Image (cartoon, helix red, strand yellow):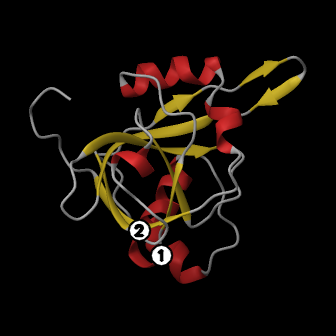
Amino acid sequence: MNGRRPVLAMRLSGSVSSGLGRAHVFMAQLHYQEQFKHILGATAWPGTLNVHVDGTDLAEYVALRDMSGIDTLEIGAGLREAADQVDLSEVEAHRVRGFLREGRSFGGATAFLATIQTNGSDILPCAILIPDLTRHVDVVEVIAMPFLREALDLVDGDSVTLDLI
């Protein structure tokens, strides 16, 4: 970030939640880390912060999933209609390429640059990461250079705001 206030493309708010603890297996892969360095300007902490979203925020997140090419078939018609109305003209997607290693496939993902903060905390640069093979519909995965739970003193249930830039 170059000192100018970036244009806010979208704001998502939600609550921190625990995941399955498996993201580190993928996040630690050198192939991904090299791409995160290009996207974030630094390598990412080998894990993700999960943020549960609902309501209007969920509709906007579904629109991001759509932009990433991820089908969200299990949502209701009202949510689908709301997601279809979301303006994504200011949102820029960054592709993270998958790869094969020792016969094992590591899928691709789409990243969206953002900032994260809690009420009264510092604003930290991050990215929303939507893996091609995600099972999450209402959980946003966030990557950043620092360990976000520690850097922002977060526990499950804390509210955070993600501003896509």
Q: Is residue 98 above or below residue 127?
A: above
Seen at 36% across and 52% down, the residue is: 88
Relative horizontal placement of residue 99, taking residue 11 as reference (left or right): right
Residue 137 appears in the figure? yes
Q: Position of residue 151 (x, y in %)?
A: 35, 45
Mark 1–mark 2 CB contact (< 8 Å):
yes
Q: Nearer the viewer, residue 136 or 10?
A: 136
Which residue is farthest right?
103
The quadrant of the picture occupied by the C terminus is top left
Which residue was labeled with disc 1? 54
Categorize mark 1 by other alpha carbons within 10 Å: few (<14), some (14-19), many (20+).
Answer: some
* First reached walking from the N terminus: tag 1 or tag 2: 2
Residue at image location 56% in from the left, 62% down from the top:
139
Disc 2 secondary structure class: strand
The kind of residue on which mark 1 rests is Asp
Location of the N terminus by quadrant is top left
In which quarter of the view is residue 57 placed? bottom left
Q: Position of residue 34 (x, y in %)?
A: 53, 17
Vertical placement of residue 125 versus 136, above or below:
above
The vertical placement of 65 against 111, above or below, is below
- The answer for how far apart the CA atoms under marks 1 and 2 are is 7 Å
Q: Nearer the viewer, mark 1 or mark 2?
A: 2
Relative image position of residue 121 (x, y in whole percent): 22, 55
Q: Is residue 65 left or right of residue 7?
A: right
Residue visible at 61% across and 47% down in the picture: 69
Residue on which disc 2 sits: 14
The one of 48 and 153 positioned closer to us in this rendering: 153
- Which residue is drawn at the image coordinates 60% and 24% (left, top)? 32
Secondary structure of the residue carrying numbered label 1 = loop
Position of residue 9 in the picture relative to residue 75 (left or right): left
Kind of residue sitting beneath label 2:
Gly
Quick check: can you spot residue 108? no
